Amino acid sequence: MSQIYERKMVIKTQCEIEELGPVIAVRHSKKNFFVSSKEYHDKLKKHPKSNPVSVVEKLDHYTYFTEQEIKNIFLNIQHQKVHELMWDAFIKNPLKVLKEAAANPDRVLRIDTSTYLLYPMGSDIPIPIPLYLDYIEGICDDEYDLDIALDILSKNPWVSELKRVDIPFYNKECGDEALCFKVLLPRDVWDKLIKKCKKNDSVFWSCRLHSHLCYKDYIKTDLLKVKSAYKKNKT
């Protein structure tokens, strides 16, 4: 059964809360979203006199994604398209999908719109999503032997949509040609990469993910094992 709460300040704010298992659906005056049942009740225990409206506003807000929407996110490689798909999920009425969300809490995710990353409830490690590499910080012929790199990457099960492209004239400082491809890391490799990037840069760590995929003079992680294609003696 849902409960309706109000907070009267300068503007009256109302929200309807319905709880089922690990998730709480919130129909808010401004938008619909989910919160974690555990986070909600933990907050109320610490601040028992708090208005429930204020409590849900301060918690992390989650969106429920259907299985098809998760697939759509993984099929799209351009960040802007992924971003639009994520926001599309907000148009649903969360009360209608509460039962499904409670049965599939792994698909109730928090959207970080500044990084395009998705976080499960109660976790500070995002789920693996495809990373797209092009000639920006990628594999270009000014640093790599593309024939060797292409052969290595074509055998890597983490790599898809691999192609050789011409670099636009306005970015010719990167070289003449580059390899473009999508990378989906296994969960264990992804988690280690996230922790490593956070340790090295607690603020802008998400900007460093792509740079660890390929070997560079300044970053030698080389998750894709393309070091042998790297030109050691550049002219």
Image: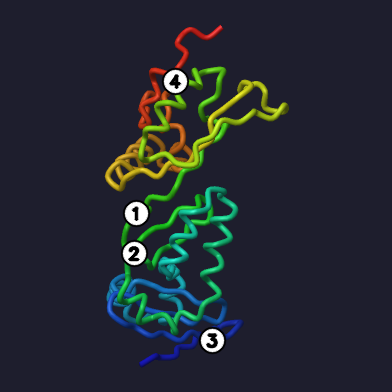
Q: Secondary structure at mark 3?
A: strand
Residue topped by disc 4: 148
Q: Single out the mark in the foreground, 1 or 3.
A: 1
**With 56 as the anchor, is 89 left or right in this view?**
right
- Label tally: 4
Image quadrant holding the N terminus, namely: bottom left
Residue designated by label 3: 8
Tell me whether circle 3 and circle 4 mark residues in contact (CB < 8 Å): no
Label 2 – label 1 distance at C-alpha: 9 Å
Could you tell whether 169 is left or right of 62 in the image?
right
Q: Is residue 111 left or right of residue 44?
A: right
**Type of amino acid at the residue the image marks with label 4:** Ile
Q: Residues within 10 Å of mark 3 (few under 14, many from 20)?
A: few
Q: Under tag 4, what secondary structure? A: helix
Q: Earlier in the sequence, mark 3 or mark 4?
A: 3
Q: Position of residue 36 (x, y in %)?
A: 34, 71
Q: Which residue is mark 2?
A: 121
Task: Find the distance from the CA under tag 3 to the CA under tag 2.
Answer: 30 Å
What number is the disc on residue 124?
Answer: 1
